[in-house]
Image (spheres, rainbow, N blue to C red):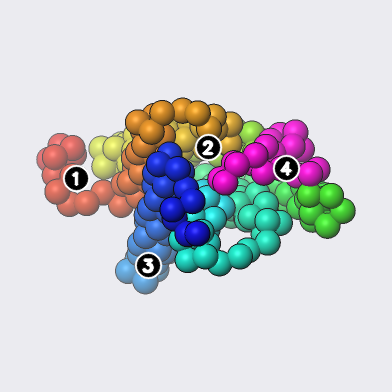
Amino acid sequence: MGIEILSEWEIVYGTSTLLIVIFSWIIGIKIILKYFQYDQKNLISVGVTWILLTSIWWKGAIIFLSILFEINIEPFIFLALGNMIMAIGLLVWIHSFTTLVYKKFHDKILLIYSVIVAVYLGFFIIFLFIDTSLIGEYTGTFSTQTSIFVKVFQLFAMVSFLITGILFVKTSMESESDEIKWKGRFLLLAFFIFSIASFLEVFRIDDISILTLIFTKLLFLISSVSYYFGFFLPKWLKDMLVKA
């Protein structure tokens, strides 16, 4: 048993997925730790956002580890991971976004999203215990065919993240500071690439080539780095991009 039961494609998928999950945690934690340096509470929610929004890859990483170490985990746990946590991640992001950009409408916007997420999670939990096929079914080692109910929310979350991200970037691009404008460009890149990478993961085709698989994972790594640069430009990069 163990890793020998996996195909070459599955090994590449499992390994690459585990790596991007670890990388997303590193990026998220680095942003959170900046709170102690700058004393800005928003950095905590911004860092947590990235960790939670990338939870759609947790399932694949945990499945890979469970096979690697021959640990038996109930399938419903895999179904719950990511699908539920991503919803919470969306709420954390909306809180961060409205606090930074639309503080006047923070409570109203957050309330609307809280109701939507609460309804989604409520039905999700009910379906999880009544009939897991209402959420999704496993079609392969790492593959699940999620229901329309789940896919609709996933698309809603991705579109919300992209649109609010663009609005967030818009405020950065209106700044007179070249540094802030460059941060906005990196955030725009992060939002677009993350949306593409998420879409490819949600609607993943199992017979794609290994090279295509690796490419999709690289997209996510690029979006993670861009997200970090959108809040913190390293000095060497700032010196290259920002005019004196």
- The kind of secondary structure element at disc 2 is helix
Q: Residues within 10 Å of mark 4 (few under 14, many from 20)?
A: many
Compared with residue 131, is residue 220 higher up or lower down, i.e. above or below?
above
Q: Which residue is mark 3?
A: 33
User: In the shown orientation, is residue 179 left or right of residue 241?
Assistant: right
Q: Residues within 10 Å of mark 1 (few under 14, many from 20)?
A: some
Give the foreground label among 4 and 3. 4
Q: Amino acid at mark 3?
A: Leu
The numbered disc on residue 136 is 4
Q: Which residue is mark 1?
A: 238
Residue at the (36%, 36%) spot, across then down: 214
> Between marks 3 and 2, how big is the CA–CA gap?
29 Å
Region rendered in magenta: 133-153
Regarding residue 30, the answer to whether it shows in the image is: yes
First in sequence, mark 2 or 1: give its number.
2
Q: Position of residue 174 (x, y in %)?
A: 39, 33
Residue at the (22%, 51%) spot, across then down: 234
Q: Position of residue 132 (x, y in %)?
A: 78, 49
Q: Amino acid at mark 2?
A: Glu
Q: Nearer the viewer, residue 63 or 44?
A: 63
Q: Nearer the viewer, residue 209 or 154?
A: 209
Q: Position of residue 165 (x, y in %)?
A: 50, 38
Give the foreground label among 1 and 3. 3
> Between marks 1 and 3, how big is the CA–CA gap?
21 Å
Q: Amino acid at mark 4?
A: Gly
First in sequence, mark 1 or 3: give its number.
3
Q: Which residue is mark 2?
A: 201
Q: Nearer the viewer, residue 215 or 91?
A: 215
- The kind of secondary structure element at disc 4 is strand
First in sequence, mark 1 or 4: give its number.
4
